[in-house]
């Protein structure tokens, strides 16, 4: 972020980061303006704004507005004020920006009013500003729209009053001069805001203007001009669509909106309508988001939630929830219902697609969320474990799941891997409880964990084996002997830890385990005996 204008002089040069340097350079160019260097300084400012984009524009506007508040906007002596001239130059370009409403809103929200020597409110300030800078009518309408989009309710009302004052000056010819994005915002806002009466809308002849906008005749263009406009529009859309397809995702939208995105089934379906071609990967990324702690997401979503509810209004399930009654957690029922209604994906494939770079489980609660979603999506089926076994690209994410899977309630998980490639520990005459055998009797689980035990994850993987060492050490030792992982460091360390007790007869079941090892993995057993002997020496 650019430093605040008021902080520019407080930053020590030795501690100034890149953005502060840009901000300081902009301030220097403004403060050093003279009639002789205005054109060169203005050109350099334009270059900086084009290079550093919206943050630079936001910073400079904030600085200029703070500066302009120290003088009188109505003072005739200010007519030749070069900073006023620069502000008008930048302000006049705002309506052409796609996000002009939010940028103007943020700019005006930071203006101080109500104190002695200051305008009484934002509406009065904006009126003085437009009059002092001689801003065009379409620029004033754009500024009024920005003020009307403030998050502050009182400021919204002031913006609406400003708009009403200015709309009285609007004629058909003025409408023709409005940039298309301003005209679109204006028509939508006046049409959908309760503060405007039907008579006011009738006076503006909204329907006629709307049809003009839709048919691209708002500017009374000729047939040749209309064709040219359509070509430019189609070219721009063709350029933007691939980028939007890559940048927009269901998970990204849900992260911005927070849990309010799933506050009701209909609201979530309305959101899904924006993503008509959902894949298992898209759903998996949304599931991964829902597994994260939600406190931070809630704080970020407080403002966006109210906007979201206003956009979608009441729902088929009843009135739109309010901010005070919305649940602080994701609604898994609405999520599953919406996904099931809109797509025909395999939820087992969704589990496989959790192998994406950002996926992590930070607690058992995350695993509980995945299990809950799967059970609701499959009419109560236990969640299969095999999608989490084998080789993942996201090794840390895979381990974050596997460290929570073995201790989980067995009735919630399906350990019966029906794949012809699935491998099970050969128990022979060993007696092992069924539930324990279903988990640690899986050679795939043991080998997957051993393969994850690289330098970075060695200690974390070893800690996962603490549980079977306590509850089924016989089964674990046999499984370690029969396993054939690609990485053998942890396997050999665990065997050296467990085998001596059996060789010395300290374990009651040694007379059953040792014959099993000789019968099922004689070569590995012999090698292990040699290693244990060397370690003892």
Image: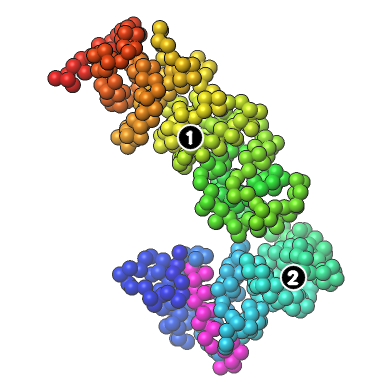
Residue 536 appears in the figure: yes
Left/right of residue 201 with respect to residue 292 in the rendered view: right
Q: Going 58% across and 72% down the picture, which residue do you hit?
A: 109
Q: Tell me residue 387's x, y (percent).
A: 50, 27
Residue 72 falls within the magenta-colored stretch: yes
In the rendered image, which quarter contains the C terminus? top left
From this view, report whether residue 257 is shown above or below residue 26.
above
The answer to whether mark 1 and mark 2 are in CB contact below 8 A is no
Residue 243 appears in the figure: no
From this view, report whether residue 381 is shown above or below residue 424.
below
Left/right of residue 202 with respect to residue 101 in the rendered view: right
Mark nearest the camera among 1 and 2 is 1
Q: Going 66% across and 28% down the picture, which residue do you hit?
A: 379
Residue tagged 1: 355
Q: Going 56% across and 32% down the picture, which residue do you hit?
A: 371
Q: Which range of residues does the magenta coloring cover?
A: 56-77
Which quadrant holds residue 383?
top right
Residue 122 falls within the magenta-colored stretch: no
Name the residue nearer the viewer: 499 or 288.
Answer: 499
- Give the class, few, some or many, for how many residues have Cα within 10 Å of label 2's Cα (few <14, many ≥20): some
As helix, strand or loop, the secondary structure at mark 1 comes to loop
Q: Earlier in the sequence, mark 1 or mark 2?
A: 2
Residue tagged 2: 176
Q: Going 52% across and 30% down the picture, which residue do you hit?
A: 352
Name the residue nearer the viewer: 385 or 204.
Answer: 385
């Amino acid at each position: 972020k650019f430093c605040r204008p008021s902080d520019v002089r407080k930053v020590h040069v030795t501690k100034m980061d890149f953005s502060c340097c840009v901000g300081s350079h902009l301030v220097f160019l403004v403060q050093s303006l003279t009639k002789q260097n205005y054109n060169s300084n203005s050109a350099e400012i334009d270059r900086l704004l084009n290079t550093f984009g919206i943050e630079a524009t936001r910073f400079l506007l904030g600085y200029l507005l703070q500066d302009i508040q120290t003088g009188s906007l109505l003072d005739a002596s200010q007519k030749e004020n070069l900073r006023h001239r620069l502000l008008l130059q930048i302000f006049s370009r705002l309506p052409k920006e796609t996000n002009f409403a939010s940028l103007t809103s943020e700019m005006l929200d930071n203006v101080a009013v109500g104190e002695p020597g200051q305008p009484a409110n934002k509406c009065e300030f904006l009126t003085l500003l437009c009059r002092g800078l001689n801003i065009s009518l379409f620029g004033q309408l754009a500024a009024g729209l920005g003020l009307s989009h403030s998050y502050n309710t009182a400021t919204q009302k002031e913006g609406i009053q400003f708009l009403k004052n200015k709309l009285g000056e609007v004629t058909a010819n003025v409408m023709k001069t409005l940039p298309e994005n301003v005209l679109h915002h204006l028509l939508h806002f006046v049409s959908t805001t309760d503060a405007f009466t039907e008579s006011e809308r009738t006076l503006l002849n909204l329907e006629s203007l709307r049809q003009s906008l839709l048919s691209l005749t708002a500017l009374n263009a000729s047939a040749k001009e209309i064709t040219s406009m359509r070509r430019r529009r189609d070219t721009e859309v063709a350029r933007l669509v691939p980028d939007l397809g890559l940048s927009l995702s269901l998970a990204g939208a849900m992260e911005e909106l927070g849990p309010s995105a799933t506050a009701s089934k209909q609201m979530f379906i309305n959101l899904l309508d924006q993503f008509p071609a959902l894949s298992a990967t898209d759903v998996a990324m949304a599931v991964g988001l829902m597994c994260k702690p939600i406190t931070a997401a809630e704080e970020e979503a407080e403002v966006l939630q109210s906007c979201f509810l206003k956009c979608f209004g009441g729902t088929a399930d009843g009135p739109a929830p309010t901010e005070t009654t919305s649940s602080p957690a994701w609604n898994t029922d609405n999520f599953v219902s919406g996904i099931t209604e809109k797509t025909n994906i395999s939820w087992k494939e969704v589990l496989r697609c959790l192998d994406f770079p950002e996926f992590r489980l930070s607690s058992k609660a995350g695993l509980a969320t995945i299990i809950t979603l799967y059970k609701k999506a499959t009419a109560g089926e236990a969640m299969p474990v095999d999608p989490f076994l084998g080789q993942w690209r996201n090794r840390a994410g895979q381990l974050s799941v596997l460290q929570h899977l073995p201790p989980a309630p067995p009735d919630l998980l399906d350990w019966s891997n029906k794949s012809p490639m699935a491998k099970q520990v050969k128990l022979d005459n060993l007696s092992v409880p069924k539930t324990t055998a279903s988990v640690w009797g899986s050679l795939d689980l043991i080998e997957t964990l051993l393969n994850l035990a690289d330098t970075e994850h060695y200690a974390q993987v070893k800690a996962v084996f603490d549980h079977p060492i306590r509850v089924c050490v016989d089964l674990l030792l046999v499984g370690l002997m029969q396993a054939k992982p690609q990485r053998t460091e942890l396997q050999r360390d665990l065997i050296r830890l467990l085998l001596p007790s059996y060789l010395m007869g300290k374990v009651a079941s040694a007379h059953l385990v040792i014959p099993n090892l000789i019968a099922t993995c004689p070569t590995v057993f012999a090698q292990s005996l040699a290693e244990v002997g060397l370690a003892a020496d």
